[in-house]
Amino acid sequence: MNFSYEHYMNLLFHLDYGKETVPSEIAKRIVSNAISPVIAVTSTSELDHHILETYNIDSLYMLLRFFSGCVSDRDQANELEKSQKDKISSNNTLTLPTTSPLPKVRTRGRSRSNSLFQRDSTQSQYIRFTKPLGDVIATKNANDMLFDYHSLEIYLQNYLDLIQKNTDDNTPYELLKKSIYHSFFSLAISSTTILSPYECFNHPVVSLIAVDISLGQNYDDVRDLLVDFKNLNSSTHNFPIFMNTNDMLPVVLLCYDDQFIEQFETCQALTKKIKKQLFVECISLPLWKDSYPSDPQVHLHQPVMSSLEEMIYFLNQPKEVTLPYELIQSIYNILDSLVYNLMIPFMKRKIAFWDETILQPRKSLFHGAKFLKKFMTKTALTHQENLLTKDAQGNEYFTSASSEFLMRKLADWSMMLSDFKTAYATYESLTHDLESFPKYSASCLEWCAVSLLMGAQNIVTVKMLKNDINPLIEKALSTYENCATVLPETDKRNTDELIVVPVRSYETRCMILASELFLSLSDTWTSTPYAISYLETILVECKLGACSQIMIWERLSDCYELRVDPRIKHKAAGTIANTSSPKKSSESDMQGHVMTPSPLTKEDVSNDANNDTDQDIVSKGFTRKRKAAFFRLMAAKKWAEQKRWRQVSWCLQSIDDTYSKIGLADRDDLILKKIQNKLKTAETETIDAGAEKNAEVSHHEVDSPN
Amino acid sequence: MSRSRSSTTTQSRSLKVTGEEIWKNKTEKINTELFALTYGALVAQLFEDYDNDYSLINERLFSMGYNIGVRLIEDFLARTALPRCEDMVRTSEVISKCAFKIFLNITPHVTNWSNNKDSFSLIIEDNPLSEFVELPMNAKKQIWYSNVLCGVLKGALEMVQLDCDVWFVADILKGDPQTELKIKLNKILKDEIPIGDD
Amino acid sequence: MPQYFAIIGTRDNPIYEAEFPSISGKNSIGFPRDLKELNPFILHAALDIIEDLQWQMNPNSGGVTTGGYFGTGGNSNSNSNLSVNNSNSSGVGFLRNRSNNNNNMENCYLGKVDHFYGLSITAYLTYGGMKFVMIHGTTGDLGGSAGGNISGDDVGGNASKSAVQIDDNALKLFYQEVHELYIKTLMNPFYRLNDPITTPAFDKRVRALARKHIVTSK
């Protein structure tokens, strides 16, 4: 079975993959996933109940949640034991075609290759699911932060507890630690379902409306639900003015029992009728079938990513969920058609439309007349104040229909579809248009840089980093900062609490995002310093829980580890194979070295390097291994303060070589020995004291994350 | 001691001049550091080879010196063309002003004469052998770092019919205020034909 | 500002360490305990950057690789507050001009090479590749407050506000004289390269030099 994206992100539950490697640009995939289109799932209570009865899953939304992530990976299906798979592969081909009434999406030949190792990450489409739009809006709060450091910390604490439980000191930890950081990272950049007024990554693109045909639900139910959805704008009390149901694609999902041919026929008839009368597409899903119970049951792994609160819930209540293999395939099939036949074309249509109606007129108007443009925008400034609209709470936003917001949407959607070029150009022009609205322009600046980093593969040069990307991020950060400080002078203390914090969360996300994307570039020698400076700024300026901070410290160490001059990369690969083998393989690929990512390379390389890696004079000064070790030590020290002994142990293991060689490891007056001693006593204690006390301790820590 | 005091001084002055003359014009020089390091390396190697058996190391150094001394005297007399010394006082002057001057470019101070003038001390300042040396703590008590000098003197004197005991009594390296080397005449050897005598 | 000085051998092993507390009135202020435990590691971490500088030192190689960082600016001497350099964060800002007006021992002095949460690290490189390094603690009264927590919010990392004022000239003198002492030590036939220097005499002399050149009394 292949090592997949999902395996990596949840490596804790797939420890047997602990020695695999991941591509260096893994961060790009995580970002793609984090900003992937959101599908809101609405279902009738009858349907939810029916699902609960048959599959012991609370609702259709909960069920679909297991299938978010990279659609083409079909990773839930991979959960099936190989032996079982072989058994069913023969009859599978017979049953599958009947499951989807829509034309089957098998034309994209390479879709089945694992997204983790695809050369071109844009080939994979990620999706996310969320609650019905009405629910999402109801939980909205003007002061919502993009990510909530407190919940992030609690999540992390839970996750670390789980690690403590599931691993021991001998577990291969290098990849696991990276995986832990990346899952932390993915939650930090997209950890809530909140709807930001300044960007629309979390705004649902598709609204899936599901009814249960097997229970006799019919056209009227669909129509009612659809009308409800369409009227959300007016019927909901606090419907955000920056959103509009017209920009969301409603799709009807008809769930039926495949046992009864007449149900299938009903679906087909209904599909036609709904399309004709309501102008909405339908998809049919054979959610039930008599043969399902006898089909091989697949244990579902937890979703790669969803909101933080739900993650915490999941970690706390591990629940075995199984579904029949055939049903899983059916669900992937309908998702395929939903995504590739409906959602993506819809988004492309919209983008084209906005491009034609908003972007092009602007361009042509100002084409070749920069002066005029400046002049126009200046005079327009006075009017711009009126462009904002007050919502019910008195907050001023661009409305969903304003050309500014539509442009932003155009850019965001281009990002979602991995069209980074369009995204960049649009963000770029938006930053100028929105200059007088710092909250909006800051976000545009940020995503301008992100789109550059996401899109550019190896073509990012030192100059680009220095002159284009970094200034963009710096500018975004300072703009965010200004947003935080430009506040009414009166009762500043009060506003600090209310407004500064949400803006700060944008700033933090911006930095953590940028740092990770910098690290995914191929020339790590030039890019890591930027990553390091962002991470350090986060440590100094941003509010984070104690464990979250240590994660950043660990990442700093990783950064230094990655800082290798390209000229000696092939040499350094041998010595750093332990900690950053993924890079090794990708790097050697690129340089066309005859190297296979196998343990053998280590020997080959060291032979290459004059049999003397210690005194390898060529690489002197071209690495930052000692820095890396030092930051790992700092992390170990801090983990010890938090009593995270597994982490301490792993950190110490990874730096042991470096320090014992030079005699710093066993000096009683130094920190390293002290941590080792603490670890020893802690380990003997935990053996003595039961798990009960452990739980108590960790519970206690949750309350005081700072 | 019937001779006048002044004659002794003239004699010794001329010895001094001879020594300086030869040092200046007839001696091939070697860099001090190289010299000191060479000797140092040798001693350090002995430390290792004899596993810090200090009395044995002292002995070794002495015997090495002896072997040097028996050869060096030949060279010394050939260069200086000095006549036979009439007494130990004269001998001490030759050693200090000529021998040490020519070979090591130092002039140890002669002092501590015994009453019967058969033993004296050489106070060596700035011993070029031990310029950078700092003895290991546990060796400090027992080792005579420059013991080779004793051997050299012993060997050389023996070749001119002077059976002497030569030994260090103090060394700055051991924390003493000065470095002092003692030479004591046992007897004058009569039965051998002097080598290199004119 | 307390200072921690160490000589690092060619195998990264510390061969001599000393802390010079600063003197304030009658009290001498050393590093807080957790820094004492950490100092050797901080220095060890700086070695990467020192080596980086070391191998760029040949003026002929200037500009080949470092793309514009090399040899900019011409005022490496003088009493400079080097807090502008951002070496810890970037590793690019630390390059000091040392290509001109240097005689022998002059270019052994690398100046400030690194910093870590308000601590500055200066370095001096002997021709044999021994590294003399020093951590300069935070100035004056910070002795107490910097103690407890270097972990986060209260200390400025790179953008550190309390960057230490380093008197380059005095420091250079100190390093040079220690270098001479070191050479003498090395000439001792019983001292072997990379062995720890344990003799009290050396320690005494180094401390005397420190008092003479760099220990501030306020």
Image (cartoon, coloured by chain):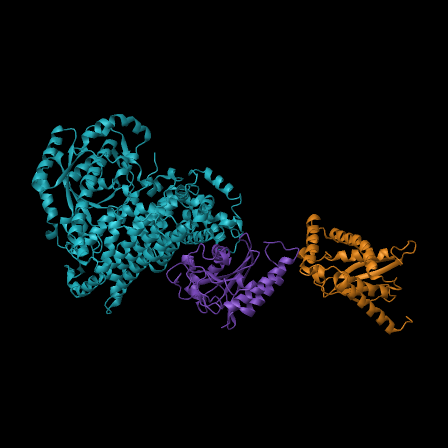
Chain colours: A cyan, B orange, C purple
| Residue C72 rendering spot, x and y as whole percentages | 44, 62
Pick the quarter of the image with the C terminus of chain A.
Answer: bottom left
Judged left or right of residue C45, residue A436 is left
Q: Is residue A642 visible?
A: no
Nearer-the-camera pick, A450 or C116: A450
| Residue B68 rendering spot, x and y as whole percentages | 78, 54
Nearer-the-camera pick, B73 or A256: B73
The quarter of the displayed image where residue A45 is located: top left
Q: Is residue B18 visible?
A: yes
Residue occupying image coordinates x 27% and y 47%:
A34
The quarter of the displayed image where residue A7 is located: top left
Residue A16, compared with residue A507, is above or below; it is above
Nearer-the-camera pick, B134 or A31: A31
Judged left or right of residue A391, residue A513 is right
Pick the quarter of the image with the N terminus of chain A.
Answer: top left
Judged left or right of residue B15, residue A411 is left
| Residue A344 rendering spot, x and y as whole percentages | 20, 43
Residue A612, compared with residue B26, is above or below; it is above
Residue occupying image coordinates x 23% and y 69%:
A490
| Residue A569 rendering spot, x and y as whole percentages | 44, 46
